[in-house]
């Protein structure tokens, strides 16, 4: 009986050790932010990272629809602006779909052509010009803009989508369920001269699993 108990304890120890090893290996594989389907699309920028500007205009800006300017500053945990952080965004069109022209490659086949890339300047600033996206048809997901972050010394990872405080679908959400990765992603549009302006500062590492300064 004693031998059986010792053997049982040994097996538990082996299983526990194996589970720890698998967990650590998974963490090393996923890196900062954990699994992120489609985050590698950030590398599909038509402009090399070193040549990116801190301002970009998405292809739909001159089309019919509510014009939108998204801007902000990227901060580090020390509260200082961080330069050279690449941001990738994409969103739906005025019909709530990710439009394609037919010649897309890579993740463009899923994300569509309404996407853009910027790199923060010396003051940590970024800015996008686009149209406010529509919500998915026949679904309860709010209007949103996806965003992926690539710091110079870390792998790419996603943060909370941009969502709009005046969207009725957002107003019906349980906001306590949001993770606030990179800080609060809910922005408040302010209209001026026919353009909606929203501001969102991004806080690197905030609520991002595996992030270390």
Image: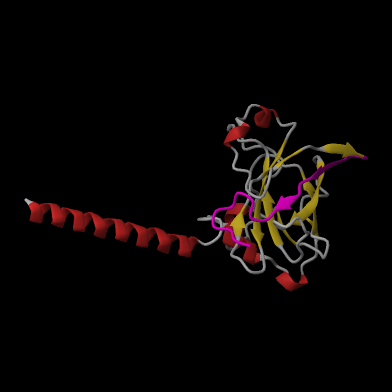
The image's colouring method is secondary structure
Q: Is residue 86 visible?
A: yes
The residue that appears at 70% across and 67% down in the rendered structure is 46
Residue 179 in the image: above or below residue 79: above
Q: Residue furthest front?
A: 2
Q: Position of residue 2 (x, y in %)?
A: 9, 53
**Corner quadrant of residue 164:** top right
Q: How many marks?
A: 0
User: Is residue 67 magenta-colored?
Assistant: no
Q: Is residue 107 visible?
A: no
The residue that appears at 87% across and 37% down in the rendered structure is 191
Of residue 92 and residue 179, the one placed in the foreground of this image is 179
Residue 144 in the image: above or below residue 35: above
Give the dominant element type of the magenta stretch: helix, strand or loop. Answer: loop
Q: Residue furthest left?
A: 1
The residue that appears at 80% across and 40% down in the rendered structure is 65
Quarter containing the C terminus: bottom right
Chain part drawn in magenta:
193-213
Q: Position of residue 202 (x, y in %)?
A: 72, 51
* In the image: residue 149, left or right of residue 177: right
The residue that appears at 76% across and 42% down in the rendered structure is 132
Residue 147 in the image: above or below residue 40: above
């Amino acid at each position: 009986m004693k031998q059986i108990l010792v053997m049982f304890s040994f097996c538990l120890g082996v299983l526990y050790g194996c589970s720890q090893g698998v967990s650590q290996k998974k963490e090393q594989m996923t890196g900062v932010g954990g699994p992120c389907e489609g985050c590698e699309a950030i590398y599909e920028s038509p402009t090399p990272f070193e040549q990116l500007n801190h301002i970009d205009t998405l292809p739909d800006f001159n089309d019919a629809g509510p014009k939108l300017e998204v801007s902000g500053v990227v901060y580090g945990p020390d509260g200082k602006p961080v330069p050279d952080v690449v941001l990738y965004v994409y969103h739906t069109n005025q019909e709530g779909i990710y439009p394609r022209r037919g010649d897309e490659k890579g993740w463009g086949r899923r994300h569509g052509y309404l996407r853009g890339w910027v790199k923060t300047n010396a003051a940590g600033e970024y800015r996008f010009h686009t149209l406010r996206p529509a919500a998915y048809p026949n679904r309860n997901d709010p209007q949103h803009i996806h965003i992926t972050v690539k710091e110079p010394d870390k792998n790419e990872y996603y943060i909370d989508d941009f969502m709009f405080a005046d969207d009725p679908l957002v107003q019906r959400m349980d906001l306590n369920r949001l993770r606030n990765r990179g800080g609060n992603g809910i922005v408040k549009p302010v209209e001026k001269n026919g353009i909606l302006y929203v501001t969102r500062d991004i806080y690197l590492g905030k609520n991002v699993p595996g992030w270390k300064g």
